[in-house]
Image (spheres, coloured by chain):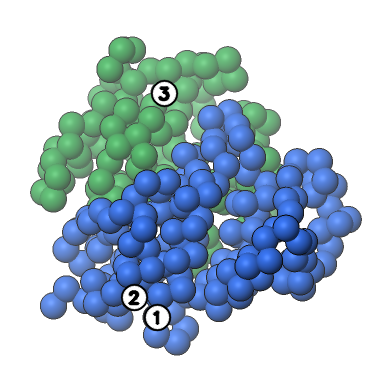
Amino acid sequence: MSACPSIASIFMPSERNSPTAGTLGTVMQRDAGDAAKDAVVLQKLGKTGWQRLYEFRTYYTQGWGEGDGQPVSPAALEALYGFLEGLELQPGMIPSVYLLKDGSLGLAWEDVAQNEIEVCFRSKEIRYYRGSDETELEFASNRAAELGRIANRLGSNR
Amino acid sequence: VDQPLVPDGENILRAVFSNECDNQRGPFSSVFTGGDVSVSRPRLIPLNEHWGLFRRHVQKPPQRMLLFFLEINVAHLRDLGRNHTAKPTEIHVEEQPCDWNPAHARIVEDLPKGLAKKIIKECSRHDPPSWNTVSY
């Protein structure tokens, strides 16, 4: 295990001075490979997405919200990373990321025809939604990378 | 469904926080999916008192900010569920008062994403009375 503060220090320069950084959150040790994952998140989700995911991982601890919120599911996070590695979207197309009460993570964006796409990463499965025809599909989490690679084709249902 | 149902004539409020909404795309389907979705009843506690209630008990600044409330009539919500062609859904809104919010209720069912998006579009949105820019 090694601390990997490089990207965090770039985007969160005032974190150490934040009154909540050390009191509400849990800043965890990170694996060496996390730098590569950070880079993928930054590349595919941009600064805002990277920052939101960082906050979800760091500050949303057990019991967040109304007391029943779950921290980010490690399995969901791994599936998200795998999906993003394979995902190739058109330039300027940047998905939004969100967190659900059960610790699942979601991505939302629009395909080239401006139809909504949402992908939800749960601990055991991935749920894919295509707004153009309201198709909802379910995949095993271990197919995340494959799903990322074919996401563009799934989005186009013509 | 164990508890009494919220009557069809009532409206319900869904508080939307920064983890389930962003500036670019607004609220995501997660606002109404997953099952056991927390809502509140403005008939019991007026909307203007909900801001303080939710800020005191649920909001955790600076990361998790209360952004706005969505409001919809229960009968309309249930109609949307029944008429959702991709997967007709019988929606139940159950009373579930709790210590910090006696007007608390919940949507029992895990709704399809397409239905959740339709519901979001049908809701009235209430921004904070003294709106100021929140970064999320």
A84 lies above or below B127:
below
Residue B128 picture quarter: top right
What residue is disc 1 on?
A: A88
Rendered location of residue A73, percent (x, y): 51, 46
Under mark 2, the amino acid is Arg
Q: Could you give the CA–CA distance between mark 2 and mark 1, rounded to whole angstroms?
A: 7 Å
Structural crowding at the residue carrying mark 3, measured as other residues with C-alpha within 10 Å and reported as few (<14), some (14–19) or many (≥20) = many
Q: How many labels does the image show?
A: 3
At 51% across and 75% down in the image, what residue appears?
A44
Residue under circle 2? A149
Q: What kind of residue is marked 3? A: Ala
Say which element carries label 3: strand
* Left or right relative to B76: residue B48: right
Horizontally, residue A52 falls left or right of residue B94, namely right
Work out whether disc 3 and disc 2 sit on a shared chain: no
Chain B shade: green
- Chain A visual colour: blue
The residue type indicated by label 1 comes to: Glu
Closer to us: A110 or B68:
A110
Position of residue B88 measured from the top left corner of the image (x, y, whole percent):
13, 41
* In the image, residue B135 above or below residue B70: below
In the rendered image, residue A14, in percent from the top left (x then y), is placed at: 84, 62
